[in-house]
Amino acid sequence: MNQFLSLIKINLKLSMDVVFSGGRRKKKTGFGKIGLILLFVIFGVLMFVSFGAIGISVAEKVIEMNLKNIYISLILLLGLFMGFISAIIVAPSVYFLSNDVETYLSMPLKSGYILGAKFISLVLSQFYLIILFVAPMAFGLLFVDFSITALIGWIIAILFIPVFPSLVASVL
């Protein structure tokens, strides 16, 4: 289990290094990394606030028209569709185009651990996308019409939305 968690950590670190380096091999300074992380945090907060505001305004109108179930279905379908498109694009690079497969296979690791760690890193990369787009819309609906069962349902849905598109993209 410790090897599996280590592989997940390494895969996530390698994928984040590619994102933050922009494909360049030049090392960033400490201020460059902090600035880039700060930029990503500010961008994430702005995205969350803007989509949350859209979610609140749409949720008010949807509840007036008694179309709450259709709105929930649309949000979940949007999350599945975005996750599927993103997973189709990212999955080949996670499984086949990475340079770490030969290194992993030469180590005394089970092949199931390697595939599992790559799958979990794919699911977590999809989870970031779902947090940016689906969670603010869910927050908007919960802000307008809050209930504990809806909160629990949204938490479960947001946690499991990335799994299905990642599984389908992994099989394809």
Image: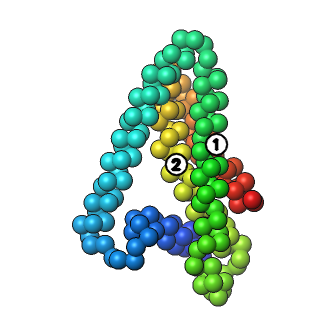
Q: Is residue 154 visible?
A: yes
Spot occupied by residue 124 in the image (x, y as percentages of width and height): 55, 57
Q: Quadrant of the N terminus?
A: bottom right
- Dividing the picture into quadrants, the one containing residue 169 is bottom right
Identify the element where label 1 is drawn: helix
Q: Circle 1 is placed at which residue position? A: 80
Contact (CB < 8 A) between labels 2 and 1? Answer: no
Q: Is residue 46 above or below residue 28?
A: above
Q: Indicate which disc residue 129 carries.
A: 2
Going by the numbered disc 2, the residue's amino acid type is Leu
| Secondary element type, mark 2 | helix
Q: Residue at x 30, y 55 (%)?
A: 38
Identify the residue at horizontal 65%, vertical 56% (top origin). Answer: 88
Q: For residue 17, say whether it is visible.
A: no
Circle 1 packing at 10 Å, graded few (<14), some (14-19), many (20+), is: many
Which of the two residues, 43 or 117, is positioned nearer the viewer here?
43
Work out whether 11 lies above or below 35: below
Which percent across, then down, holds residue 151? 54, 32
Residue at 62% over, 30% down: 74
Quarter placement of the C terminus? bottom right
